[in-house]
Every structure is written in C-alpha cells, then in structure tokens.
Image (cartoon, helix red, strand yellow):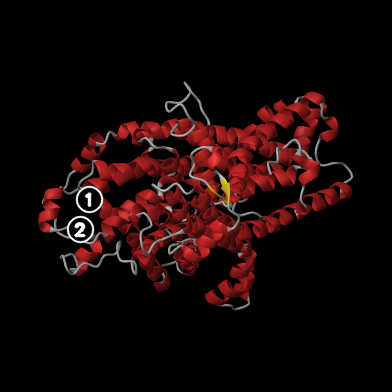
C-alpha cells in the first residue's frame, strides 16, 4: 500500500549518520523539550494518581511526595467495579468492529470490482454519512431507538439502552469510512485476478471471500485497529443512547463514576488513566497498523 | 427521501457520478467490471452484499438526518405522534432571535475551528517537517506527540481538569492562585473556559496533524529536494517553494478534518462543564435538548439542521473534488 506511513524506516535504517552538527543538537533539544511538554499532562495525572488524598490535601498538589503507591488505582478499580464496564465495552466493541469490517468490505467489493452505475453514488452516500457530526442525527435516532421494541432480545426490551443499539449505530456510522478506504484498496488489485476466476465459473461470493478479502488483510488490520480505538473511545453515542449507568461502556461510565464514587481528584486521575490503558496497549502493540489506518483514507494520489 | 440501493441507481444518480462514469465506459474498449460474466445468482448475491449494509447505513444515518430536517419544522414533546405539530419556521425564528445561547454557540464553533487551524495545525506541520529529517529517536518523539490522539477526548477532559481545577489544579497551585478569594476559575469563568478547553483540544490536535503531514511528506519525491538543494535553495526556501506546494492534497484533508472536528466538538466540553456559560457549542445545545429535562424535539432538531447545513457546505465540495480525482485516476 503506497499510502502507509512507514514509521520505522526513518529510525531503522540510518544509512549515513551525519556527524553531530550544532543545528542537529539544537533540534534534538527542542524536540525532546517539546515531547516532554507533550507528555506533561499525562505525567502530572500519573503523579497525582500515585499520591494519597490525605497527603495532597494537606501539603498541596505541587509538593514533594512522602509516599507513592498504586493504591488509588486498585481503589478506583475495585470501588467502581470497573471490570464490569470494561466487559460492557467489549460486548459493544468486538461485534461492532467485526461487523463493520465485514459489511464495509462487501460494499467496497461491490463498488470497486464492478462497474454498476450506482457505484459512485453509493460510495458518496457512505463517505458523506461518515463525515456528518453525530448530533445531526441524534434526535430522530434517539426517538427511533425508543420506538423499536425488542422484548427478550435486549435487557431493556428496546433498542434504546442496549448494547445491540450501540453496535448498530457504530456499524452504520463507521462503515462509511471503511467502505471508502477499502474500495480504494480493492481498486488497486489487478482486475485480471478476479476476471480469470469468474471465467472459470467461480461465484462472486467466492471471488470476494477467497480472492479479494485475503488480499485486503493489511488494510483490514489497519482499519480494525483504528476502529477498535475509536469505538472504545466513544463517549457520545453511549451517553445519549444508554440510560442505565450499569449498561454504559467504560469511557462514558467514567463520567458517572467520577460523580458517584470518586470523591477525590487523585482517584479520578487513577480512574481516567485506567480507562486509557487499553487504547495505549493497542496503540503500542499495533502502532504501524494504527498510523497507516489513519492515513489510508487521508492520503491518496 | 429514503433511497434504498435497489431503486436508487437510475433515478438518483447525481451528475458528478453519472457523467464521468459514462465517459470511462465509452473510453475503455472492454468494460472495467465483469458484468457480462455474471449469472443471475451472482447478481442476487451482489445485490445483497451491497444492499444490506446500505440499508443499515441509510436507515440509521441518512433517514435520521432527513428526519431531523422534517422535525425542525414541528414542535413535539416526544410523547405520541399525535402531538407533532407543524410550525413552519417558528423554531428557526426563535433560535435566531430569541435564544441567548445560539449565537454564542455559533461563535464558539467558529473560534474552535480558527484556533485549531492557527495553532496546532502549523505546529503539527512544523513537527512533521523536523521529524521527517531522518533524525534519531524520531519514533520516540512521534509517540510522545501522538499519544493524546489515541486517548478518548472524555479521558483527556479528566486529565486536563487536574491542571485547571481552581483549588487543586496544577496551574493555580504553581502560581499561588489556589486560595479562596484569589481563584482563577479556569473552568467556570466564561472569559477563560473556552480557551482553557481549546488548549486541551490543541494538545490532541497537534499530534493528529503531525501524523497526516508526516504521511504527506513521505510522499514527496526525494529528487525534488535534491534538485532544490543543487539550485542552492536553503532549507526554508526549499520548504516554501518546493515541499509545501506538493503537500496540497494533505492540506485539503487537514482543512476538512479540522472543520469537521470543530463542528463535532463535544466530549471535552461536556466533561469540563457540560457547556455551561462560556463554552456553548451547537453540538451541546442539540444534546441538551434530548437528554436534558426539557424535551423540545423540534427545537433541538432545528439546531441540528443548522449544524447539518454548515457540515454539508464543507462535505459536498470536498467529496466532489475527491471523487473527480478518483475518476481521472
């Protein structure tokens, strides 16, 4: 894929290391300073989270620590039953990511491998849909979710306040972006590839499932990483479409938790950092996929 | 209003789609697709493959967007369909003339965009140019700048509150403004809070812009740089006259992304102070009309329509230019 950013190339292969010039040193000092400043808010949160409330309320936040511990993290975790909210997130995010990839790859296959007259229009509909601000659609969506009865299928008996409702809107909304990116990717695959199979009598489903889809693995991996982080980080949909605090995914639950359970800022800091951990882990593990996913759609031609 | 995939093709294909499509079909001797090889069953499979996702997307995104437009001309308390009443432009009239929060919200959305385009965007570009110089530890620096982009805006809101809190926050503690009576209320003061939130938003946006520009810079032909150096251009001249002009596609994306981010802005503000005085945004006003006590659906939809119109002014030209390029390619 020509559009991926190869972040390793720059560091992995320093072919000719130029002798240290003053300008280079200056640049490193500048970048190191900036990087540290950029990490500052997170380091500050970590520092606050590692100090007991009693100590900070007595000595102030800007003070030398007597004691640093991870107590606030364990307290935040146990007091608020965070495991429960992490599970809520998993129940939404895993199906949402998989279904989004599946559905959008089918649309992409349709618009990129065949020259139907609808193609461009279809792709426009998907791409534009993903660019709309969520608030443009939320009012009718909220009403629609309240209207749809699903007795026995969801806990609430409706689409509203259910994991299924969140999955559906994530899939509908994100498939716009994925269909656009995947169709570009599929268009770059040679046409002879599927043409030959079709002449040999393969069905279109086989073309999709056994030829095109396996070739799209890199793009799918990149999009999957990106989607996981986006859906995990969702705050708005869950805030509006889930009413029971118990049913909320972790990111939006944090908002409730900070009011209900967390009485001191140090505990809030710990809770916030705990919430961020899964995305940071995914990012560090799949950095290349994430970054290439982000630029897949953005950088063409 | 609703366009299901099976019936939309002939009726609804817009000019930007059909024109170029017809042209390429004529120009190429062999049709690009495999249509002539398809059996009936294949056609059915294809219809389902494209149809099901489209129905879901159109039903939840586009039907609701159009429903917002329809509801904007009504009043409705949300209880029963009988209570929906057509009121024409009344909601808009009230919004434009009689809502103390509306114009501040529009202004704040604009400020949000201007701030993001003036500070984090050039900064992200600058960092990208520096990091593109094949320096050591590039990866480490990149990670530091990019980390905030990976995090949820809601979480970022909590992290920055630790800095802005009037009595326990970092800034007031450092400058000694944390005693009652001397507070600088970064979150509550309507003259300050928007800027405080914008700093947090910029913190995140810089990394995002940096990554987009890094990707753009990777695509710049190295021979351009060489030629420029041979001609004796210095670093700034090379950037200004050679590199920056080639970043035009990236700049377009950056502009669109930033406008959309400014229109979508919500999470940070909601976590900070729920859009109270000084931080009103269109997105917050819409949301307050749904999850607040007052259920003024028509009125909330009217605000959503304003948001929709502004978004489409950006989205449509962007899509037209993108898809035109695609057809040419």
Q: Is residue A170 left or right of residue B154?
A: right
Q: Is residue A254 left or right of residue B320?
A: left
Q: Could you tell me which residue is drawn at 51 percent across and 28 percent down?
A: A149
Vertical comparison of B222 with A232: above or below: below
Q: Nearer the viewer, residue B33 or B275?
A: B275
Q: Is residue B81 visible?
A: yes
Callouts 2 and 1 on one subunit: no
Mark 1 neighbour class, 10 Å CA radius: few under 14, some 14 to 19, many 20 or more: many
Is the Cβ of the residue at disc 2 closer than 8 Å to that at disc 1?
yes
Tell me how far mark 2 sits from mark 1, CA to CA: 8 Å
Q: Nearer the viewer, residue A212 or B295?
A: B295
Q: Nearer the viewer, residue A15 or A267?
A: A267
Expressed as whole percent of the image width and height from the top left, the position of residue B302 reads 54, 54
- Extreme residue toward the top, this view: A152
Expressed as whole percent of the image width and height from the top left, the position of residue A49 reads 23, 48
Q: Chain of mark 2?
A: B
Q: Which mark is drawn over residue B94?
A: none
Q: Is residue A221 visible?
A: no
Circle 2 — which element?
loop
Vertical comparison of B147 with B224: above or below: above
Which quarter shows the C terminus of chain A? bottom right
Mark 2 neighbour class, 10 Å CA radius: few under 14, some 14 to 19, many 20 or more: many
Q: Chain of mark 1?
A: A
Q: Could you tell me which residue is drawn at 70 percent across and 43 percent down?
A: A122
Residue at numbered disc 2? B168
Expressed as whole percent of the image width and height from the top left, the position of residue B70 reads 61, 48
Q: Nearer the viewer, residue A198 or A122?
A: A122
Residue at numbered disc 1? A265
Q: Where on the picture, by quarter, is residue B32?
A: top right
Expressed as whole percent of the image width and height from the top left, the position of residue A190 reads 74, 40
């Amino acid at each position: 894929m020509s559009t991926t950013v190869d972040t390793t190339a720059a560091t992995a292969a320093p072919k000719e290391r130029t002798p240290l010039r003053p300008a280079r040193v200056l640049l490193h000092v500048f970048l190191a300073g900036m990087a540290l400043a950029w990490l500052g808010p997170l380091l500050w949160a970590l520092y606050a989270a590692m100090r007991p409330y009693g100590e900070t309320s007595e000595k102030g936040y800007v003070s030398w620590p007597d004691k640093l511990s991870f107590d606030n993290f364990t307290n935040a975790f146990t007091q608020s039953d965070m495991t429960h909210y992490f599970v809520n997130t998993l129940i939404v995010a895993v199906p949402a990511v998989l279904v989004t990839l599946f559905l959008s790859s089918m649309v992409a296959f349709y618009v990129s491998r065949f020259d139907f007259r609808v193609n461009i229009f279809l792709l426009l509909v998907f791409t534009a849909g993903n660019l709309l601000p969520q608030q443009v659609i939320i009012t009718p969506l909220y009403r629609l979710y309240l209207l749809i009865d699903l007795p026995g299928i969801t806990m609430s008996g409706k689409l509203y306040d259910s994991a299924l409702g969140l999955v559906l809107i994530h899939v509908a909304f994100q498939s716009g972006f994925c269909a656009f990116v995947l169709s570009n990717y599929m268009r770059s695959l040679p046409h002879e590839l599927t043409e030959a199979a079709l002449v040999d009598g393969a069905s279109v489903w086989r073309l999709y499932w056994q030829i095109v889809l396996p070739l799209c693995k890199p793009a799918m991996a990149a999009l999957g990483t990106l989607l996981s982080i986006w859906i995990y980080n969702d705050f708005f949909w869950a805030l509006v479409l889930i009413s029971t605090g118990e049913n909320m995914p972790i990111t939006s639950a944090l908002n409730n938790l900070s009011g209900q359970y967390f009485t001191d800022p140090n505990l809030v800091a710990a809770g916030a950092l705990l919430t961020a951990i899964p995305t940071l882990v995914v990012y560090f593990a799949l950095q290349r996929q994430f970054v290439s996913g982000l630029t897949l759609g953005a950088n063409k031609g | 209003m609703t366009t299901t995939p099976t019936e939309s093709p002939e009726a609804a294909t817009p000019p930007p789609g059909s024109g170029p499509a017809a042209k390429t079909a004529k120009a190429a001797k062999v049709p690009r697709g495999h249509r002539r090889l398809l059996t009936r069953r294949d056609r059915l499979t294809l219809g389902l493959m494209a149809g099901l996702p489209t129905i879901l997307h159109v039903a939840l995104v586009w039907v609701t967007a159009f429903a917002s437009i329809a509801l904007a001309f009504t009043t409705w308390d949300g209880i029963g369909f009988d209570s929906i009443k057509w009121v024409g432009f009344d909601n808009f009239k009230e919004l434009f003339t009689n809502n103390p929060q509306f114009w501040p919200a529009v202004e704040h959305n604009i400020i949000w965009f201007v701030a993001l385009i003036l500070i984090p965007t050039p900064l992200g570009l600058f960092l990208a140019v520096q990091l593109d110089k094949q320096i050591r530890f590039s990866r480490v620096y990149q990670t530091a700048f990019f980390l905030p982009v990976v995090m949820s805006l809601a979480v970022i809101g909590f992290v920055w509150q630790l800095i802005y809190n009037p009595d326990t926050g970092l800034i007031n503690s450092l400058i000694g403004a944390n005693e009652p009576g001397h507070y600088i209320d970064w979150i509550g003061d309507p003259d300050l809070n928007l800027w405080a939130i914008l700093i947090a938003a910029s913190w995140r946006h810089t990394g995002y812009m940096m990554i987009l520009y890094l990707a753009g810079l990777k695509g710049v032909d190295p021979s351009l740089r060489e030629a420029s150096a041979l001609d004796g251009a210095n670093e700034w001249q090379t950037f200004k006259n050679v590199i920056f002009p080639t970043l035009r596609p990236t700049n377009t994306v950056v502009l669109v992304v930033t406008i959309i981010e400014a229109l979508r802005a919500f999470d940070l503000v909601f976590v900070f102070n729920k859009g109270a005085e000084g931080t009103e945004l269109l997105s917050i006003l819409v949301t307050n009309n749904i999850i607040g006590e007052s259920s003024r659906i028509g009125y909330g939809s009217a605000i959503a329509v304003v948001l929709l119109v502004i978004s489409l002014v950006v989205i449509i030209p962007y899509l037209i230019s993108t898809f035109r390029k695609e057809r040419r390619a």
